[in-house]
Amino acid sequence: MSLIVMKFGGSSVGTTERMGRVAQRIIDKKLQGHKVIVVVSAMGDTTDDLIDKANEINEKPPAREMDMLLTTGEQISVALLSMAIHKLGHEAKSYTGWQAGIVTEDVHSKARISDISPDRIFNALEEGNIVIVAGFQGMTDRGEITTLGRGGSDTTAVALAAAIKADVCEIYTDVDGIYSTDPRVVKCARKLPAISYDEMLELAHLGAAVLHPRAVEYAKHYNVNLVVRSSFTNNEGTLVKEEAEMEQGVVVRGIAFDKNVARISVLGVDDTPGVLAKMFGALADNEIDVDIIVQNGVQDGKADFSFTVSSSDRARAFDVLASIKSSVPYRETTFEEDLVKVSIVGAGMVSNPGVAAKMFKAISDIGVNIIMVSTSEIKLSCVIASDPLTDVVRALHTAYGLDSSDTAFVGGPSDRR
Amino acid sequence: MSLIVMKFGGSSVGTTERMGRVAQRIIDKKLQGHKVIVVVSAMGDTTDDLIDKANEINEKPPAREMDMLLTTGEQISVALLSMAIHKLGHEAKSYTGWQAGIVTEDVHSKARISDISPDRIFNALEEGNIVIVAGFQGMTDRGEITTLGRGGSDTTAVALAAAIKADVCEIYTDVDGIYSTDPRVVKCARKLPAISYDEMLELAHLGAAVLHPRAVEYAKHYNVNLVVRSSFTNNEGTLVKEEAEMEQGVVVRGIAFDKNVARISVLGVDDTPGVLAKMFGALADNEIDVDIIVQNGVQDGKADFSFTVSSSDRARAFDVLASIKSSVPYRETTFEEDLVKVSIVGAGMVSNPGVAAKMFKAISDIGVNIIMVSTSEIKLSCVIASDPLTDVVRALHTAYGLDSSDTAFVGGPSDRR
């Protein structure tokens, strides 16, 4: 008998009919002899509807009250899912985040879990119940209701799995695992049987929206075995685990890409100490995430910088730069839009110096110009023009031997929360 | 400066626009220099919508899970009302029942409040906040979420007022006070400036749906000054308080009526000990509320009984009687439908023996036959045919000197919860 955490996203329980199918799936797991804890997100569009209602009343609602409001979405889900399980003749008990003992920092809208007291959950399991816990929410030690921010339900599931020392934490979603790249772009994308925490983290940060990075970090920290699998099929999923146990010989595990990249260049900046700190400090103060930064060398005491931001932040970044021109003098700013960042990720890259060269060659063979490059121990990213993106991803997928003969399963609408 | 509890029902906050008006009303009270605690019900049809959703999934949902589900309705209300108050530039904090320290018995769907720990509310008031508490809900000492049943938000408001020793508990609703009778029936019905707890209890039980009887009982027990007034006008309301302080000389305070009464007669019952207990025990086991019971005397060892039930329970009551015929033998059952119960209520009735005679005469003067009579210390009820109900109520209203020259305000849809 194992102790298993199952997490279902909002689209998996989006209708009462889907709720019934999820209930059956949970019961099947229990009938296999396991103890089961379920974490659920709010149903379908519930959260968006609540946000709309709040904005009708107050376009800048206090974060504390927003947390009070939004946590009802998950509370509705857990109650209904419990009813669906009872309907099928099994015992279940639902719990809010605070009832499940999930304690967070004293921060609203994006709190981190600081502690979990799982006694009550253990007792309910001992009594033979399927335990259902509201995702995305917790309570501070002063009794204030908090939410965990985007990806919060994944984090709840992983944190609970760590606290109760679950054998596995299964994340049910609308895709049936982690793929070597986006199966909508490359038909012969390969479903990975396993991937390391670090590789998953890089892929998550690089735009593969299946698992939230914070949940993966949590899993890595507490060494929780994660499985990503489909709510709609019985296909085997992808196991996310410690690198040491991984299959050997794989250099590149997957290819990620992020559309909507813009490059901004600041030309003729005085090369004096503190210039970079001021410039990027001002951007950070305005909550503009800067990704890759490149300095092109210094000439005549003047430097040129380039950096990338999300396309949607480009105009705001320009405004910020204009506003600090008096304290950080520069000659001019330019930008390029419609760029993409393509990345190869793999723990085996560290000891394989030829990996980068192969990427550059594959891209240039298609006649695409590489605009910027960024590296880490286990990933290599190139910023290129967005136009022939599909060709580039396919070429890289083939070059690193990732092509599969199977056709990938591609699920319904995205199931993030 | 006073400490004031304001309670708003579901229709008072049924739309975001009404929510804004309620917010302004609360702020006005605070600006008058008072400390304000607000209790709110779920918005408009929220509770019914949640019940529908539950029934789609499970037509017999467990009471515990139903409480988990329904309490989200009030949590949504308090969060949005707090946002509306912030929007108008004032500080407010919303609290669920458990956060407000409302502890209940360990029963689901109709728990009674057993204790309130108002420290957190006091602290929030001290910090200058308007405090907003979700009505209708509490928590057991094991941390289970419970609801208080029908009229629960009224009870929350009164119980909170008792716990914090509030100067007054104002119940805002869709009528602007307690009337001498239903203003929709008698145009010259008089709004009562004051009424005693006991009189209000009788009126509430007799079908005047403005205040829930349990809330009135609670107010009586803890001597909480209650005011019933309109959410939509600034008219003075009705004060519900201890009888000792009431104006003297009023014999009949008001006239209530309950339509949908059916009378069932059981004829030729063996007059042996325990027969009544068996008969009414079986009805109670089937959750059929029996109101007036009359025995018509015994002849040849056989007795005839009559009793009233709600029209909607009549058929079921007949089935129950048929099912126990072997253990409680009787000759036959008959029934009459389309009856009403008309009641006069007033603390002054105790010492005025002529009151009953006046009622009987007023009814017979219209040519209406009195079918059954029931009395208590402060009320007298007659069951009559429903047909000339309006005439009867008007005649009684005039006979007891209750007619007013003002025209009553009659509000929108009923605002019960």
Image: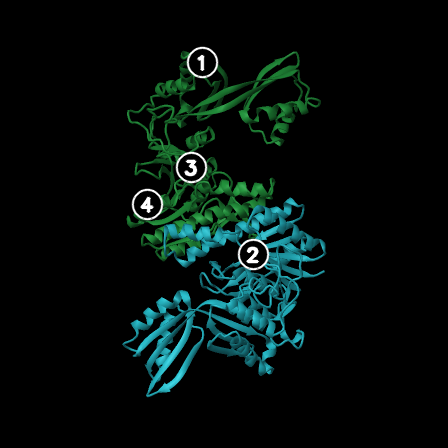
Chain colours: A green, B cyan
Q: Residue beneath label 3, please?
A: A415
Q: Residue beneath label 1, please?
A: A368
Q: Do callouts 1 and 2 mark residues in contact (Cβ within 8 Å)?
A: no
Mark 3 is surrounded, within 10 Å at the Cα level, by few (under 14), some (14 to 19) or many (20 or more) other residues, namely: many
- Specify the quadrant of the image occupied by residue B221: bottom right
Percent x, y for residue B108?
A: 44, 61
Question: What is the secondary structure assignment of the residue under circle 3?
Answer: loop
* Nearest to the observer: residue B177 or residue A245: B177
Q: Residue beneath label 4, please?
A: A25
* Nearest to the observer: residue A125 or residue B351: B351
Mark 1 is surrounded, within 10 Å at the Cα level, by few (under 14), some (14 to 19) or many (20 or more) other residues, namely: some
Tags 4 and 1 on a common chain: yes
Which numbered disc flags the more N-terminal residue, 4 or 3? 4
Identify the mark at residue A317; answer none if there is no mark.
none
The mark total stands at 4
Nearer to us: label 2 or label 3: 2
From mark 4 to mark 1, how far is it between C-alphas?
Answer: 47 Å
Q: Residue beneath label 2, please?
A: B9
Q: Chain of mark 1?
A: A
Nearer to us: label 1 or label 2: 2
Tags 2 and 4 on a common chain: no
From mark 1 to mark 2, how far is it between C-alphas?
Answer: 65 Å
Q: Chain of mark 2?
A: B
